Image: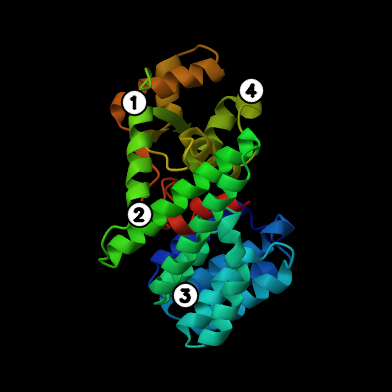
Amino acid sequence: MPELLTADRIDEIGALGLKSPDPAAFVAELVSAVDEGRVADPDDTGYALLVAAEILRQAGDLADALALATRAIAEQPDDNAYARAVRGGLLLRLGRSDEGMAELTALRPLLETDPAATYLVDELAESGHADTALEWLTAALDAILERTRTQQHASEDAQDEAAAMIYGLAQLRHDLREEQGLPHDEYDNLADRLSAASTHALDALDDGPATLLFWPQAEFNALLVRWPALVDSYPPTWDEHRAHLERALVDASGLGGGVGLGIVTGSVEGLSAFAGADAIDEETLDEYADSLDDAGITTWPPGRNDACWCGSGTKYKKCCLPRLRA
């Protein structure tokens, strides 16, 4: 019986395909799994097609990438904002500017409500429309700040979400303007102040930078085999493990920026040496994570164009960052 394609395997194929000089086989594996109904979780069908589209986009095969992105939308029409953004970006790259801008413009309001919708800005900037990206970021900041001024009695959760979005959009806008060689303006100054305030607040914590324990895929699987009792301490799959870490880091940052936060990487061999014959529980895991601090902390978040912290080999903005849209 043909093997089912899990989310972990989709990510693995994506990472391999992006590095391969001949990515066609990796694209074929993803597409054939969709065609044959071999995607383990039907909700990952569109994701498999988008990963295949990204492999083709990186390889320069924009027309076939567009076809797969379009198909991803048709396969999962109720969860298609990211797929539509990818399609819009591909249309722009193919010179079909009117169609591409129409697709992205329809999604533009998400920048004011969805912290993960910065993929719209990525698609614009990477297809040669950085000016439009900056215009949209500025308008989104204007709208969110106005909303915070007029909704004085909003819940604490709503205020925290607005603060996180202001931080994230201001930093992204600041970085993009810096890439364009533009001088500082009021929003750039705001981005600098928010970044400095976040750093100062986290530096003031008695316990120093916050770190979370991350298990690479092979170690995660081995961990639950070695200590089955830990199954209640972790999500059922490695893919969910890294998604939960990303969300926890964003939540811990308070402002959505993650300054002063980090990740320590565990290993089954290291945990066994640390704990000896003792039973492994959550308290032991916390103590083990603390013992790893001196061995090196991976600072979170990486740059949007840097390799993702989870080790997939894919850029952060294409890997764990967009997982927040789920």
- Density class for disc 3 (Cα within 10 Å; few <14, some 14-19, many ≥20) is some
Q: For the residue labelled by badge 2, is the local secondary structure a helix, a strand or a loop?
A: helix
Could you tell me the amino acid type at mark 2? Glu
**Which residue bears the numbered disc 4?**
229
Instruction: Please report contact status of discs 2 and 1: CB closer than 8 Å, yes or no.
Output: no
| Residue 283 appears in the rendering | yes
Does 312 sit above or below residue 221?
below
Figure quadrant of residue 113 = bottom right
Could you tell me the amino acid type at mark 1? Asp
Q: For the residue labelled by badge 4, is the local secondary structure a helix, a strand or a loop?
A: helix
Instruction: Please report contact status of discs 4 and 1: CB closer than 8 Å, yes or no.
Output: no
Does 115 sit above or below residue 77?
above
Mark 4–mark 2 Cα distance, whole angstroms, equals: 53 Å
For image coordinates 42% across by 76% down, the residue present is 127
**Which residue bears the numbered disc 2?**
186
**Which residue bears the numbered disc 1?**
293
